[in-house]
Amino acid sequence: MNYQRPELRNMLAAEYVLGTLKGGARRRFEGLLHHDRELLVLVETWTGRLLPAGLPSEEVGPSHRVWFELNQRLDDSTSTVRDKPSRLRWFHRLWPSGFSGASLTAAVGGIAIGVAGMLLIAPGVRVEDLTLRSGDGRSAMQPTASTEGQLPDSYIVVMPDRTGTPALLAAALRSGKVLRVKVLQEFEIAPEDIPVLWALPHGGPPTVLGSLPTEGVAEFDLLAVSEQALARVDELAVSIESRSARPFSAPQAGYVMRSSLIRSW
Amino acid sequence: MVRDAAASERLTYLIGRVAMQDRAAFKEMYGLTSHFLFRVAIRHLRDAERAEDVLQESFMEAWQKAPTYSAALSKPMTWLMTIVARRSIDEYRRQVREGQAIKPASIDDPETGWDISVVFPDSVRELFGSDVMERLERCFAQLSVDQRRAIQDIRVHGMTYDEAARFYKLPRQTVASWVRRGIQSLTGCMQT
């Protein structure tokens, strides 16, 4: 076979891309590719022509599971040089959505005991801040307590990762109209995705509270003082949604973390 | 989505960084390409979960083989597409062997939702350039229905000529002739 004939080279390149070149013919062709740059260009040309053909026109994308698992596999590999070596990639250690029962109760209970101290020492989530906001006219009611070292009546949610390390903290004064959320460990998600916070009312469908930053603090204005707005809410939860899926009406792939709403009074 | 030459250059740069095991670059590369590549896998497998598995394996391969990528030999997206398409076909053929595969459906089967007329979605036009894709559409349109169908079915299902012949219940030579004449027509058309 004369591999210098342009027509033959073109046909072989196309059939190679198409996948119809098999067996010995394929092996011989691949042998040529090692030292025939022009043949490689032909293969590249036919790849660009044939591979996009027949793609579904529907704009669909992979779920966030792919990225998370990829990230985990890279974490697990021993040869990686990480962009941020000290970052705790907590997302892969989150509790499974069905995690519940005694261990959860114990974990949340144990964390709740320490919450007052966390609220006072965690940067950006001081009780004084919440108190100021409440006294700023956002609430018609006055805070019930603001003495230093004493936790005012508040709703608190701590979402731990699978190791029990707090990953997200949410708090609202009982008499306030703002729910403040601090992301304690950065979300590692694909750029096109976004974490979304949900309220899970007792016996009702989830209610979206809004999107979260991947790190830092977010505030959500409640429609009423939290004692009313959160009265029937059992839990808060976080899901990962595609940014293109706005507005969010229901979580598309379940929750990546959820935890009970704790009343401090 | 990688929309233009500048973005393609960016992707080339990112693959270079990935070759040095730069996780941030890998994340950006995933963000730029994963939606498109997922559709490549879906086309072959028609099952979102399996397509996601293939996508994950493909990105792992890209992570490992990034040091071998040469921008002089291949555009970054075609390099990635080739990985995904090859793995998708391998997975499809494994399913066939194990009796798990969805029965092959011709590209013009209404149930697949694919268009035999080969009209490229906007995202593909943006990726490869509108001019090239419009010309390719016109060239595909000039093929006979049999030629178009055979090229796409074989591409999607990774069939051999023998398998395609059994699929169409036609002589092997007939199917091979459709494909080769189709390739010749496309070649001539794209050069004009």
Image (tube, coloured by chain):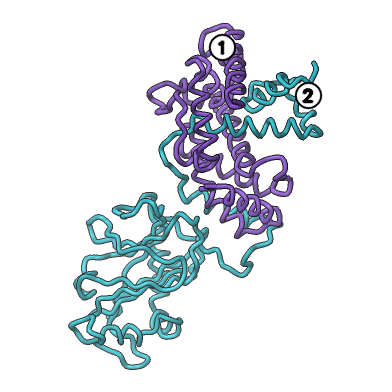
Chain colours: A cyan, B purple
Does residue A30 sit above or below A247 in this rendering? above
Q: Nearer the viewer, residue A119 or A80?
A: A80
Seen at 41% across and 27% down, the residue is B112
Please tell me which residue is depicted at 65% across the width and 59% down the height of the picture.
Answer: B22
Residue B53 seen anywhere in this rendered image of the structure:
no
Quarter of the image containing the C terminus of chain A? bottom left
Front: mark 1 or 2: 2
Residue marked by disc 2 = A28
Residue A258, position in %: x, y? 38, 62
Q: Amino acid at mark 1?
A: Ala
Q: Quadrant of residue B159?
A: top right
Whole-percent x, y for residue B74 in the image: 68, 40
Residue A168 position in % (x across, y down): 43, 69
Residue at image mark 1: B165
Q: Residue furthest front?
A: B192
Which chain does the residue under circle 2 lie in?
Answer: A
Q: Secondary structure at mark 1?
A: helix
Instruction: Sort mark 1 into few (<14), some (14-19) or many (20+) by Cα contacts within 10 Å.
Output: some
